[in-house]
Amino acid sequence: HQEIQQNVRLVCENSLFVTLAPFAPRSPFEMWIMPRRHSSSYVAIDEETLAGLTDIFSESLRRLDTCIPNVPYNFVLHTQPLGSELLDHYHWHFEIVPKLTSIAGFEWGSGFYINPMPPEEACRYLREVEL
């Protein structure tokens, strides 16, 4: 809720989802798509939620493509393990990680990523593009 209220790293939103830049992104323009309502399992979403996810994915990717045309990226889904009980402490989400930087010795050795662009600046670009 704090991220939404502060509106500093908020990229876009609809009634069911928000797209945010994480506090410490690994890559410039990295975005996380998260449901507003707590849920630990992506597999458990209903048709209405899936439609909202489709809409926010589409808008998020159009914003990214408008800022950086044809940028390659990875999708990562974080959800609870299949077959496990619902987890109160876990919140499923998607990550969109553009491939704009190279992972080199420092990143491999330390696990820390060098990102030359603050997430707040990337969000400003993503929010202000005309779709």
Image (cartoon, rainbow, N blue to C red):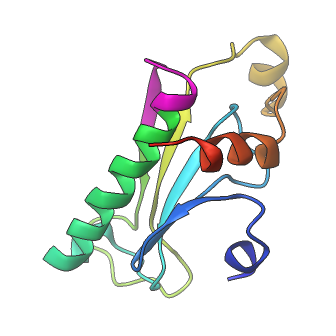
Q: Which residues are magenta?
A: 65-75
Picture quarter containing residue 29? top right
The correct choice, above or below, for 43 with respect to 87 in the image is above
The residue shown at (57%, 29%) is: 67
Residue 128 in the image, given as x and y percentages of width and height: 64, 46
Q: Quadrant of the C terminus?
A: top left
Horizontal placement of 57 versus 30: left or right?
A: left
The residue shown at (47%, 27%) is: 73
The residue shown at (72%, 72%) is: 3
Residue 8 in the image, given as x and y percentages of width and height: 78, 62
The residue shown at (71%, 36%) is: 26
Residue 14 in the image, given as x and y percentages of width and height: 43, 72
Residue 87 seen in the figure: yes
Horizontal placement of 105 versus 99: left or right?
A: right
Is residue 80 located in the magenta-colored stretch of the structure? no
Label tally: 0
User: Residue pushed farthest front?
Assistant: 130
Horizontal placement of 109 versus 66: left or right?
A: right
The correct choice, above or below, for 30 with respect to 17 in the image is above
Horizontal placement of 35 versus 124: left or right?
A: left
Residue 46 seen in the figure: no
Q: Depth check: 73 or 55 in front?
A: 55
Q: Quadrant of the N terminus?
A: bottom right
Q: Depth check: 37 or 18 in front?
A: 18
Q: Depth check: 77 or 110 in front?
A: 77
Residue 50 in the image, given as x and y percentages of width and height: 22, 68
User: Residue pushed farthest left?
Assistant: 47
Picture quarter containing residue 10? bottom right
The correct choice, above or below, for 19 with respect to 105 in the image is below
Is residue 72 located in the magenta-colored stretch of the structure? yes
